[in-house]
Image: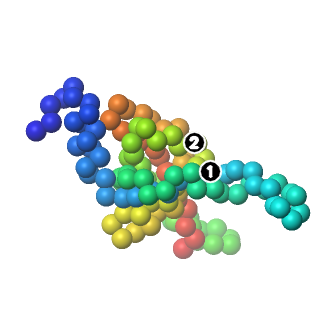
Amino acid sequence: MVSFGNIPAERAAIESTYEGLCTISEMKDVKDPVTGKTQQQPIIVLANEPCGLSQSSLPAATQTVTADQVNYDAKLFISPDVTIKPGSRITVQQNGMEFKGEQAGKAFRYATHQEIKLKEVLNA
């Protein structure tokens, strides 16, 4: 049994529940060697980081003139040692599914973990 106040033990207990692995990408300036033009492209800054993903709300379907969309909100649980910038793209592989989301806000850090709200929009 974990006693409260023992942060390393609490952190180990929380991290033992992580069932997913995530890849984190950030938009970076990349210069094309041929044209010399600089463009923003997603660059992987961290791969295969243990994490947990939890659904925050039931999916909401939206119908527009051009497409039907399904919006998912989720919460990412990850080590407090990882720095994830707002706007980062985060892909999580967990329990046979893939969630491709964008960070919807600033990380909320605890001594044992951090929580990050993610949003995924899919065309139905």
- On screen, residue 8 versus residue 70, left or right, reads left
**Between residues 84 and 81, which one lies in front from this camera angle?**
81
Q: Residue at x 47, y 46 (%)?
A: 117
Q: Residue at x 70, y 50 (%)?
A: 28
**Three-letter code for the amino acid on which mark 1 is drawn:** Glu
For label 2, the residue is: 85
* Outermost residue toward the top in this view: 5
- The quarter of the rendered structure image containing the N terminus is top left
**Three-letter code for the amino acid on which mark 2 is drawn:** Lys
**Between residues 124 and 22, which one lies in front from this camera angle?**
22
In percent of width and height, residue 62 lies at: 56, 64
| Circle 1: element type | strand
In percent of width and height, residue 75 lies at: 41, 49
Q: Residue at x 57, y 71 (%)?
A: 123
The answer, for residue 121, to whether it is visible in the render is yes
**Between residues 44 and 53, which one lies in front from this camera angle?**
44
The answer, for residue 57, to whether it is visible in the render is no
For label 1, the residue is: 26
Residue 79 in the image: above or below residue 92: above
User: Disc 2 and disc 1: Cα gap in Å?
Assistant: 8 Å
Q: Residues within 10 Å of mark 1 (few under 14, many from 20)?
A: some
Residue 31 in the image: above or below residue 114: below
CB under 8 Å between callouts 2 and 1? yes
In percent of width and height, residue 97 lies at: 40, 69
**Between residues 10 and 59, which one lies in front from this camera angle?**
10
| Circle 2: element type | loop
